[in-house]
Amino acid sequence: MKHILKILALLVAISAVWIGLLQTSIIPGSYTWLLPLYLIVSLGCYGLLMVGIGLMQFPTCPHEALLLQQDIVEAKDFLKKKGVDVGSD
């Protein structure tokens, strides 16, 4: 619930700043109307960047892969003992 309140508070703050910019003449009105679009595009770029960084730093776990292979062999042996056809291996 706290996370939702933080997001709502951030949205209210951004909206207040945007409305304030619309009412003043600090930034031309034509640019001010595009600010929400710029925000959405910026958030999309940030999300893609975070996904890309996560993929570049994706850890490999050779020990875990060996453990998984052992579990698969044990499961196949168990199922063969029970009379289940588990494939050609």
Image (cartoon, rainbow, N blue to C red):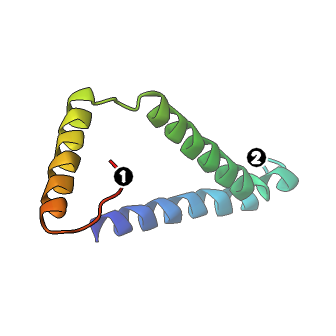
**Looking at the image, do the residues carrying marks 2 and 1 touch, with CB atoms under 8 Å apart?**
no
The local crowd at label 2, few if under 14, some if 14 to 19, many if 20 or more residues have their Cα within 10 Å, is few
Q: Position of residue 58 (x, y in %)?
A: 40, 32
Q: Position of residue 18 (x, y in %)?
A: 66, 58
Kindly identify the residue that appears in the image at 16 percent across and 53 percent down.
Answer: 77
Kindly identify the residue that appears in the image at 87 percent across and 54 percent down.
Answer: 30
User: Disc 2 to disc 1, how far (Cα)?
Assistant: 73 Å
Front one among 75 and 84: 84
**Amino acid type for the residue under numbered disc 2:** Ile
**Against 1, is 30 above or below?**
above
Residue that extends furthest to the bottom in the rendered view of this protein: 1
Front one among 12 and 53: 53
Kindly identify the residue that appears in the image at 37 percent across and 61 percent down.
Answer: 6
Q: Which residue is mark 1?
A: 88
Front one among 86 and 28: 86
Task: Name the secondary structure under disc 2.
Answer: loop
Task: Name the secondary structure under disc 1.
Answer: loop
Q: Which residue is mark 2?
A: 26
In the visual, does 45 lie left or right of 24? left
Kindly identify the residue that appears in the image at 84 percent across and 56 percent down.
Answer: 29
Q: Find residue 83 and report its image quarter.
A: bottom left
